[in-house]
Image (tube, grey):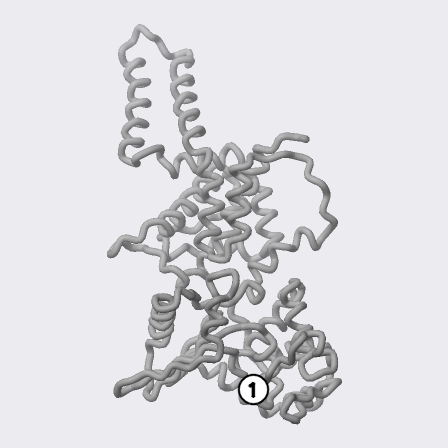
């Protein structure tokens, strides 16, 4: 699933139809069923094909595009996500502009999305209809539809609209925040400037935000509710370990991919010492119960000692159990590969192929063919990939490569989360006790 949608006039028109529940398209123009009357007396009847074409051309003409940003020669726009639950950043910086100094002054403006960015979000809605099914999305869409109508009194206060375009209406109602940066000369470091502004803002106000799209605009976050949408929710038939449940809930609730991944990893990590020690015991037991073993032969005793010494050496080198080996043992014991494949396919039909054809550059983790016939080899490859991703998230020494960069690698990391989550779910369920 690609985070960057195709930006086209057709997608923008489809987004308008979905938002306003109207099929009013004639010769490329979009006409509202009910015109919008603004507080300043202006009326908006729709969007012209000329405006839609201009917006499409501008978006596709950006020098750099990501899921959450557009950069041109002298300006850029970044979607922002407030990093606190009450939206302190949005409230503190709402519609504020900061003028830079020097020979090449840079202007920073925080507030509603531009017409172009609002149109881009429409493309997201058009190409991922499931985004419109969340409760928050429905609330925001109703808010947009009520702007300028008699029903807007239900909102207690009117939503002000700056401008006279239908895309200004969408920008006013969509409840998103962007950072728009404008320079007097061409620049190639707009993302650096954006992150510098966010640090400066957090340092001085304790209000933090990051570059990125809110959960309602990300298919990965929305699709988590598909299981409950596909059928009624039954009462649980098992009880589960409280520690594992708490880690799982932390993962589900996490808004930051790094925290989500590590929360699910901790579920597997919970059993590392247990399975590692049991594996050592089983190796020793297997050795001394083998018919070829004799307590009278020194070489047989030395073979057992060698097993224990090797494991003790690994523990010393690792500062604990060999985590990658322990992770594979956990997968061997609790994870069914066919079920894992089925879960991944149900979530995103492209993910299994993605893991087979793509490595994880920020972690140095290799490809894994989850549909392979040798399940033990598959679990080993999965354990190696998961463990390397985990190491990249928790180790950030200067000069170490590869290394995870917070936020910059979030889109790559998001594709690794389903593998970790569905693995963790099987581990939790395997510990369940029938009610």
Query: As drawn, is 56 to the left or to the right of 139?
Result: left
Residue lying farthest front? 156
Q: Quarter of the image holding residue 403?
A: bottom left
Which quarter shows the C terminus? top right
Q: Is residue 28 visible?
A: no
Q: Is residue 263 visible?
A: yes
Between 394 and 363, the one lying in front of the other is 394
243, above or below 17, in the image: above
Who is closer to the viewer here, 385 or 432? Answer: 432
- Tell me residue 187's x, y (percent): 33, 82
Location of residue 222 with respect to 228 vertically, above or below: below
> Where in the figure is residue 103, as x and y percent of width and height?
26, 88
Residue drawn where x is 31% and y is 14% of the image: 300
Residue 113 rendering spot, x and y as whole percentages: 52, 78
Q: Is residue 53 left or right of residue 202?
A: right
Residue extending furthest top?
296
**Residue tagged by mark 1?**
162
**Residue ID at (49%, 76%):** 94
| Most foreground residue, 227 or 358 | 227
User: Residue at left 49%, top 85%?
Assistant: 58
Element at badge 1? Answer: loop
The quadrant where residue 9 appears: bottom right
């Amino acid at each position: 699933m690609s985070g960057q949608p195709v930006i086209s006039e057709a997608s923008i028109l489809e987004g308008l139809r979905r938002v306003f529940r109207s099929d009013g398209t004639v010769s490329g123009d979009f006409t509202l069923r009910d015109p919008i009357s603004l507080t300043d007396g202006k009326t908006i009847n729709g969007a012209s094909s000329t405006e839609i074409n201009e917006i499409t051309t501008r978006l596709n003409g950006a020098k750099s595009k990501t899921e959450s940003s557009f950069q041109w020669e002298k300006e850029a726009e970044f979607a922002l996500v407030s990093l606190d639950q009450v939206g302190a950043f949005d409230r503190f910086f709402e519609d504020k502009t900061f003028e830079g100094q020097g020979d090449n002054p840079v202007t920073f403006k925080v507030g509603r999305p531009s017409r172009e960015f609002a149109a881009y979000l429409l493309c997201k809605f058009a190409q991922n209809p499931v985004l419109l099914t969340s409760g928050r999305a429905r609330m925001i869409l109703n808010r947009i539809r009520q702007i300028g109508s008699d029903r807007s009194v239900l909102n207690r206060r009117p939503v002000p609209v700056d401008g006279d375009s239908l895309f200004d209406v969408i920008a006013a109602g969509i409840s998103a925040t962007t950072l728009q940066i404008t320079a007097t000369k061409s620049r190639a470091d707009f993302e650096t400037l954006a992150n510098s502004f966010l640090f400066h803002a957090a340092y001085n106000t304790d209000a933090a935000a990051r570059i990125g799209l809110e959960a309602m605009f990300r298919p990965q976050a929305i699709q988590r509710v598909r299981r409950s949408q596909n059928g009624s929710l039954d009462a649980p038939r098992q009880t589960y370990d409280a520690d594992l449940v708490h880690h799982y809930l932390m993962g589900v609730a996490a808004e930051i991919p790094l925290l989500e991944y590590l929360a699910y990893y901790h579920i597997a990590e919970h059993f590392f010492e247990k399975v590692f020690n049991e594996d050592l015991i089983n190796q020793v037991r297997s050795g001394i119960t083998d018919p070829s073993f004799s307590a009278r032969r020194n070489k047989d005793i030395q073979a057992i000692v060698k097993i224990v010494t090797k494991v003790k050496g690994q523990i010393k080198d690792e500062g604990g159990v060999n985590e990658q080996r322990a992770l594979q043992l956990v997968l061997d014991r609790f994870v069914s590969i066919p079920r894992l494949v089925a879960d991944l396919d149900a979530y995103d039909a492209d993910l299994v192929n993605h893991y087979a054809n793509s490595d994880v550059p920020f972690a140095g983790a290799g490809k894994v063919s989850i549909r392979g016939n040798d399940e033990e080899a598959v679990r080993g490859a999965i354990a190696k990939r998961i463990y390397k991703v985990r190491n990249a998230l928790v180790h950030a020494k200067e000069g170490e490569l590869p290394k995870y960069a917070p936020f910059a690698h979030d889109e790559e990391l998001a594709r690794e989360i389903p593998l970790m989550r569905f693995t963790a779910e099987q581990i939790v369920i395997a510990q369940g006790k029938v009610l």
